Image (cartoon, rainbow, N blue to C red):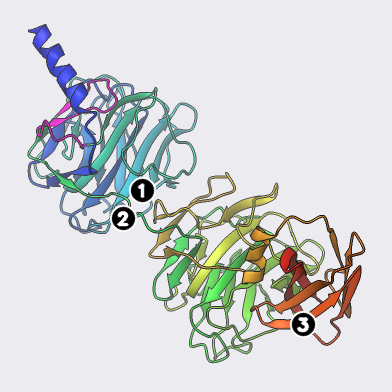
C-alpha cells in the first residue's frame, strides 16, 4: 500500500512539470472548496494568494466569505486561523474588510484588517498575511502594507483540523464566490515592507510549505503542490479555467489619468517631512484661465476643512484669482494657508512640463517650472508633519471633480530642498538620491495596480484606473543624446544658466566648420550658427525658460544637452 501511495506521489510530481496556459480555480460560493489536509499550515508565517470576486464584496455582505481557513466549527478555535471578508452586522467599521485572524493555544482571537472594505467584481487582488518574528502580524493588499497590525509573533500552531481554500471548514454559507490562483504557504515571514507581488505562477522558496498554481490538467480533482513537498490537496467542486491574473500591457514609461476618477494612493506617510516634490506632466487638454475646476497633480487634502499639515499642487480654476496658474499650497499645523503660483496660466495640450515645489529652510516656498524659479514666493519654511490622510496623485482626496486629465512621469519626493536657483530638470527616468523618500518612473507595466517606488525604499502606491502608456517626456533633441557619435572633439558650454549669451568652445582647432543648432522646449528651431574653435550665440532677446542645443560635426551629432535662460 505504501508503494502505491509513493507511486501516485511520483506520478503527481511528474505531472506538475506540465506547462501551458495559466489556469485559475473557480469557486461557486455554495459548496466548492479545496482540502489541503491538517498539517500543511502548521508553522506558517506567510499566507499569500491572488483572488478575484465574481460579485463585488462590500459592507452589505450577509455572511463571511473565506479565502482560506483552518476552522471547522463555531466555538472553540484553539490554534486555528482564517482569512475572510467580514459581513454586515459584525461592526459598521469593519463590514466588507478582509480580516486575518489567528487563535492562540488559549483560544484568544488576534485579528488584523485591510484598509479597504470594497472589492470589485472581476478584479484580481493579491493578499499576503504575515506573522513576522519581530514585527508581528501584518496584512498586505497588492503589496501595500495595511494600517492594522498586531504585535503577536507566534506562528500558526499545530491543529488536527484541515486547512481549506475557499471555505470556512464546515460552517454553512461561508464559501468564497470567485477565482483563486497561486496560493503559497511559507514558514518564514517573506514580507516586512511594501513589495511588488509576483505575477503569475508563484515559485517555491526554501521556506515554502506548499504552493498551488492549479495549472495541471492530468488530475482534475487534485490541487498539486508545485513545491515538490507533495502537500497535494483535494478539489471539491471547484473548476479550473484559463485566465491571466495580471493584465500585462505594452511597455510603459509614464502614466495617463482620465480626469474622471483615475488616481494613485501613495499612503499616509510618504509626504511627511518632504521638502521637494517634483514631476513631469502633460495635459491632455489645454489648461488656461477658463478651467472649470481644480486640476490636481498631487495633494494631501481629504476634505474642504480641517487642513492642518496638508498640501496641494494643482491648477487654479476660473473662479480663482490666479485662474489657470499652477499653485503650490501648504497648510501649517494650525491651518494657516501659504501659497506660491506659477508665472504662466496657460499649459498646452500634449506638451510636457517639469514642476518642482520646494520648501526651502531659508528661502521658504519656491516653485520651479521647467527649472525656472517662478516670481511668487512666501517665507513659510516648514515641511508637512505626519498625518493619517493619504497623499494622492491626480486628485484631492474626497473632493469631487478635482482630477487631472493627462500624463505624469518621474514623480520624486525628497526630504531636502533640492533646488534654490534655476536648474536643468532631469530627463528622463529620474534617479533616487540619499535624500529621496520615493521615486516613481511608472516603467513597470507587469502589474497595473502597483506604482513601484524605484528608490528601493518600498514606498509603493496603489494605482486606481490610470494606465501605463508610451510617450517622450523630453523633446527629440534630448533623446538624440543616446545616438551621439564618438568624437575626439570635446565641447565646453558656458554659462548655463545663460543670460545674454552662451559660448561653445572646442578642444581642438577644426579646419571643418562645426554647427550649433538651438531649439526651444517644444522642438522649434531658434537658430543655426557655424564656427571653428569657438562659437558665441546671443541670447539676450530669448525669453526665460528651457532650451536644447545640438553640436554637429561632419554632418553628425557629437553633443546635445539642455540650456536654461534666466
Few, some or many residues within 10 Å of mark 2 (<14, 14–19, 20+): some
Few, some or many residues within 10 Å of mark 1 (<14, 14–19, 20+): many
Residue 193, above or below 505: above
The residue at the far top in this view is 2
Q: Kindly state the secondary structure of the residue where label 1 is placed.
A: loop
Q: Which numbered disc covers residue 323?
A: none
Residue 384, above or below 145: below
Q: For the magenta stretch, what is the residue range?
A: 214-233
Rendered location of residue 64, percent (x, y)? 19, 46
User: Which quadrant is the C terminus positioned in?
Assistant: bottom right
- Tell me what residue is drawn at x 83 percent, y 76 percent: 530
Q: Is residue 292 left or right of residue 326?
A: left
The residue nearer to you, when weighing 324 against 547, is 547
User: Which quadrant is the N terminus positioned in?
Assistant: top left
Q: Is residue 108 left or right of residue 525?
A: left
The residue that mark 1 highlights is 114
- 3D distance between C-alphas at marks 2 and 3: 59 Å
Residue 198 visible: yes
- The magenta stretch spans residue 393: no
The residue that mark 2 highlights is 117
Residue 117, above or below 289: above
Q: In the image, which is nearer the foreground, mark 2 or mark 3?
A: 3
Rendered location of residue 15, percent (x, y)? 18, 27
- Tell me what residue is drawn at x 45 percent, y 74 percent: 399
Amino acid at each position: 500500500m505504501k508503494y502505491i501511495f509513493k507511486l501516485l506521489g511520483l506520478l503527481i510530481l511528474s505531472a506538475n512539470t506540465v506547462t501551458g496556459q495559466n489556469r485559475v480555480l473557480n469557486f461557486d460560493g455554495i459548496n466548492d472548496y479545496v482540502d489541503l489536509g491538517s498539517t500543511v499550515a502548521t508553522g506558517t508565517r506567510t499566507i499569500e494568494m491572488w483572488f478575484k470576486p465574481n460579485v463585488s464584496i462590500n459592507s452589505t455582505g450577509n455572511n463571511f466569505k473565506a479565502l482560506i481557513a483552518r476552522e471547522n466549527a463555531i466555538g472553540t478555535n484553539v490554534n486555528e486561523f482564517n482569512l475572510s471578508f467580514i459581513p454586515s452586522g459584525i461592526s459598521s467599521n469593519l463590514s466588507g474588510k478582509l480580516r486575518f485572524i489567528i487563535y492562540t493555544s488559549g483560544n484568544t482571537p488576534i485579528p488584523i484588517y485591510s484598509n479597504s472594505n470594497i472589492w470589485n467584481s472581476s478584479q484580481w487582488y493579491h493578499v499576503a498575511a504575515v506573522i513576522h518574528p519581530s514585527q508581528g502580524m501584518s496584512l498586505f493588499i497588492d503589496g501595500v502594507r495595511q494600517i492594522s497590525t498586531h504585535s503577536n509573533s507566534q506562528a500558526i500552531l499545530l491543529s488536527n483540523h484541515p486547512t481549506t481554500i475557499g471555505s470556512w471548514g464546515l460552517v454553512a454559507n461561508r464559501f468564497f464566490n470567485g477565482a483563486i490562483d497561486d496560493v503559497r504557504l511559507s514558514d518564514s515571514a517573506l514580507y516586512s515592507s511594501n513589495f511588488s507581488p509576483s505575477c503569475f505562477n508563484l515559485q517555491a522558496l526554501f521556506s515554502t510549505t506548499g504552493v498551488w498554481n492549479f495549472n495541471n490538467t492530468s488530475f482534475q480533482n487534485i490541487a498539486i503542490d508545485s513545491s515538490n513537498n507533495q502537500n497535494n490537496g483535494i478539489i471539491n467542486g471547484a473548476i479550473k479555467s484559463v485566465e491571466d491574473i495580471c493584465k500585462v500591457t505594452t511597455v510603459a514609461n509614464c502614466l495617463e489619468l482620465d480626469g474622471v476618477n483615475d488616481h494613485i494612493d501613495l499612503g499616509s506617510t510618504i509626504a511627511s517631512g518632504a521638502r521637494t516634490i517634483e514631476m513631469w506632466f502633460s495635459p491632455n487638454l489645454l489648461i488656461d484661465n477658463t478651467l472649470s475646476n481644480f486640476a490636481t497633480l498631487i495633494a494631501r487634502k481629504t476634505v474642504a476643512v480641517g487642513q492642518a499639515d496638508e498640501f496641494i499642487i494643482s491648477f487654479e480654476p476660473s473662479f480663482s484669482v490666479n485662474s489657470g496658474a499652477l499653485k503650490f499650497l501648504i497648510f501649517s499645523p494650525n491651518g494657516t494657508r501659504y501659497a506660491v503660483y506659477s508665472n504662466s496660466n496657460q499649459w498646452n495640450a500634449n506638451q510636457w512640463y517639469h514642476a518642482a515645489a520646494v520648501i526651502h529652510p531659508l528661502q521658504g516656498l519656491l516653485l520651479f517650472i521647467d527649472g525656472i524659479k517662478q516670481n511668487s514666493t512666501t517665507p513659510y519654511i516648514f515641511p508637512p508633519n505626519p498625518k493619517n490622510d493619504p497623499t494622492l496623485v491626480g486628485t484631492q482626496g474626497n473632493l469631487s471633480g478635482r482630477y487631472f486629465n493627462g500624463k505624469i512621469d518621474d514623480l520624486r519626493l525628497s526630504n531636502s530642498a533640492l533646488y534654490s536657483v534655476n536648474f536643468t530638470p532631469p530627463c528622463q527616468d529620474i534617479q533616487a538620491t540619499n535624500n529621496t523618500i520615493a521615486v516613481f518612473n511608472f516603467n513597470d507595466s507587469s502589474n497595473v495596480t502597483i506604482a513601484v517606488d524605484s528608490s528601493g525604499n518600498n514606498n509603493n502606491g496603489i494605482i486606481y484606473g490610470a494606465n501605463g502608456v508610451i510617450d517622450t517626456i523630453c523633446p527629440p533633441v534630448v533623446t538624440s543624446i543616446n545616438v551621439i557619435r564618438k568624437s575626439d572633439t570635446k565641447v565646453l558650454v558656458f554659462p548655463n544658466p545663460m543670460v545674454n549669451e552662451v559660448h561653445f568652445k572646442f578642444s581642438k582647432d577644426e579646419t571643418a566648420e562645426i554647427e550649433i543648432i538651438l531649439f526651444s522646449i517644444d522642438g522649434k528651431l531658434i537658430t543655426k550658427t557655424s564656427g571653428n574653435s569657438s562659437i558665441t550665440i546671443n541670447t539676450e532677446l530669448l525669453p526665460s525658460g528651457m532650451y536644447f542645443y545640438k553640436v554637429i560635426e561632419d554632418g553628425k551629432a557629437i553633443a546635445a544637452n539642455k540650456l536654461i535662460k534666466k
